[in-house]
Image (cartoon, rainbow, N blue to C red):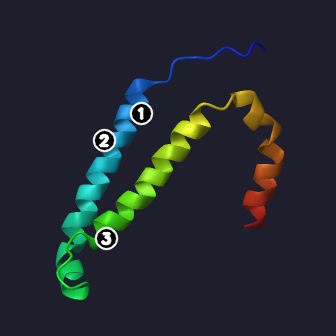
Amino acid sequence: MPKQKSVPDFVLIGVTLALLSIGLVMVYSASAVWATYKFNGDSFYFVKRQLMFAVVGIVLMFTVMNISYWTWRSWAKAAVLVCFIF
């Protein structure tokens, strides 16, 4: 198979980032009062925490996106075994 670099699907990336943004708003609206009470007035405590994990996820998404599909195919059987074990 030819290893040709393709253009990423910008619609899929945009929808993913939009869902991520909506999720951050939901985390804030669900936890602002509790975070203010529990963490000395920091109503963004859980949002900051969620945003940290979101940034790590976005970096990993773009890293994995640039690795060839054929590379992942060679690791597929080992990944399935690991998933069944854990």
Of marks 2 and 3, the one in the foreground: 3
In the rendered image, the quadrant that contains the N terminus is: top right
Q: Mark 1 points at which residue?
A: 13
Near mark 1 (Cα within 10 A), the count class, few <14, some 14-19 or many ≥20, is some
Horizontal side, residue 52 vs residue 4: left or right: left
SS of the residue under disc 3 = helix
Q: In this orientation, which residue lies closer to the viewer: 15 or 3?
A: 3
Q: Which residue is drawn at 41% across and 25% down?
A: 10
Q: Which residue is drawn at 78% across and 43% down?
A: 76
Q: Which amino acid does label 3 sit on?
A: Phe
When asked about the image quadrant of residue 81, the answer is bottom right
In the displayed structure, 45 sits above or below 72; it is below
Q: What residue type is labelled 1?
A: Ile
Q: What residue type is labelled 2?
A: Ala
Q: Which residue is drawn at 82% across and 46% down?
A: 77
SS of the residue under disc 1 = helix
Q: Which of marks 2 and 1 is nearer the N terminus?
A: 1
Place of residue 32 in the rendered image (x, y in percent of width and height, measured from the top left) = 19, 73
Q: Name the residue under label 3.
A: 46
